[in-house]
Image (cartoon, grey):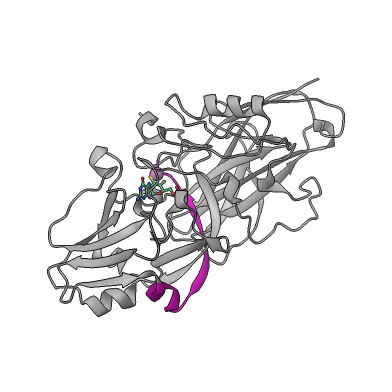
């Protein structure tokens, strides 16, 4: 079911080749563009968790940024190569005064830098189609006000140079925290991520964040976008959910992930097992992330950071001190002001909100 969505997925990660192939096989059954095998280097611990996490006294950082080399790319077709000098963003449709913005206008408008976690609605529980970045851009609202939205307008169609299209209600797009973004982690957007300008609409999955944005059309009739037309959620709101990302040194890749840990040695389970992950909601702060080591029979409170914005992932960790060897099933459940994550583990076209079950074997 997810194959179509993942078809053009490219993952850039500095990992060992064999590990990489394993990840690719685990990521989806679909075709994956793996044109990046050259230049891989090895790294024992995933750079997502560079802290000395085995020391529970270390404070969790406020932000963990996904390096560009690791940030997933999801494009339904080839990336569009857009010339910033000739680029225009047109505000059209049910507006009083259609306008066209050029790149200089975007750069000269008031700038805001903010953190936002991007996740694909097709990200299977535990999958890698998620990344956190600091973005820079300017609010869209003043431009919409300048164009003047007609009374009858109910939705906006947001269009990319690759003919990608998605729609959202007028009230969602006219929020002050919707921005026209031209930088990611302090550098101009790369071609893959939408150079020169993309739009970011917080609280929604990636499909509502068109890259290579060239037109915003006010509509008087509702319409479905590219992915929405194929059955993916039309609202695409991010549900309250958590992801286990790391168990000791192992990066968790998907729901079938199994981890075996030795008893002895530097990373042996006798010294404690680090479990870490992220949690996200559409608009409310995450209140807690609970971890179960016995498939839901009992729950432990994890340590977490407190991002200023609910649109940036909350980072959590737990240092497990196992008493005996054996097989364990790990679950992480997030609770926000609005919702408690359900305990099922289904992926769906509304996005995966279920908990991820990770099997861990502690060797005798
Ligand atoms: N123009 C355009 N914008 C797009 C897409 C696309 O195919 N074309 N894919 C969307 C999807 S499905 C996702 S998940 C995000 C991913 O953003 P990223 O590639 O920068 O990570 O971009 C969205 N914006
Ligand atoms: Mo997506």
Q: Quadrant of residue 132?
A: bottom right
Would residue 322 be found to the left or right of residue 257 on screen? right
**Looking at the picture, how far across and down is residue 37, in whole percent?**
59, 31
Q: Residue at x 75, y 58 (%)?
A: 59
Residue lying at the far right of the rendered structure:
265
**Looking at the picture, how far across and down is residue 237, in whole percent?**
37, 52
Would residue 299 be found to the left or right of residue 183 on screen? right
- Residue 95 vs 56, above or below: the answer is below
For the C terminus, give its image quadrant. top right
Q: Which residue is drawn at 82% across and 31% down?
A: 268
Q: Can residue 32 be seen in this view?
A: yes
Q: Does the magenta stretch include residue 239?
A: no
Would residue 76 be found to the left or right of residue 54 on screen? left
Q: Give the range drawn in magenta.
A: 104-121
Q: Is residue 113 magenta?
A: yes
Would residue 168 be found to the left or right of residue 199 on screen? left
């Amino acid at each position: 079911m997810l194959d179509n969505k993942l078809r053009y997925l490219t993952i850039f990660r500095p990992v060992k080749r064999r590990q990489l192939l394993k990840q690719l096989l685990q990521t989806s059954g679909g075709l994956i563009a793996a044109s990046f095998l050259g230049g891989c280097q090895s790294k024992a611990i995933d750079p997502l968790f560079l802290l000395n996490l085995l020391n529970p006294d270390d404070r969790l950082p406020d932000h963990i940024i996904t390096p560009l080399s690791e940030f997933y790319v999801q494009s339904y077709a080839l990336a569009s190569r857009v010339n910033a000098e000739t680029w225009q963003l047109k505000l059209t449709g049910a507006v009083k005064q259609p306008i066209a913005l050029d790149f200089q206008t975007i750069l000269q408008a008031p700038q805001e830098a903010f953190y936002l976690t991007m996740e694909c609605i097709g990200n299977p529980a535990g999958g890698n189609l998620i990344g956190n970045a600091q973005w820079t851009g300017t609010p869209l609202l003043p431009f919409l006000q300048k164009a003047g939205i007609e009374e009858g307008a109910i939705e906006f169609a947001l269009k990319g140079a690759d003919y990608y299209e998605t729609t959202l209600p007028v009230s969602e797009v006219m929020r002050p925290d919707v921005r026209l973004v031209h930088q990611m982690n302090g550098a101009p957007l790369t071609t893959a991520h939408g150079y020169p300008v993309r739009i970011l609409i917080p609280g929604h999955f990636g499909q509502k964040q068109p890259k290579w944005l060239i037109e915003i059309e006010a509509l008087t009739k509702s319409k479905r976008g590219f992915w929405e037309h194929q059955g993916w959620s039309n609202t695409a709101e991010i549900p309250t959910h958590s992801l286990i990302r790391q168990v000791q040194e192992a990066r968790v890749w998907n729901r079938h992930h199994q981890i075996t840990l030795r008893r002895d040695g530097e990373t042996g389970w006798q010294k404690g097992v680090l479990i870490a992950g992220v949690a996200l909601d559409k608009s409310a702060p995450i209140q807690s992330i609970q971890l179960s080591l016995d498939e839901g029979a009992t729950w432990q409170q994890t340590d977490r950071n407190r991002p200023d914005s609910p649109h940036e992932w909350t980072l959590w960790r737990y240092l497990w001190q196992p008493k005996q060897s054996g097989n364990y099933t790990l679950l992480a459940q997030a609770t926000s002001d609005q919702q408690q994550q359900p305990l099922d583990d289904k992926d769906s076209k509304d996005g995966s909100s279920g908990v991820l079950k990770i099997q861990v074997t502690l060797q005798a």
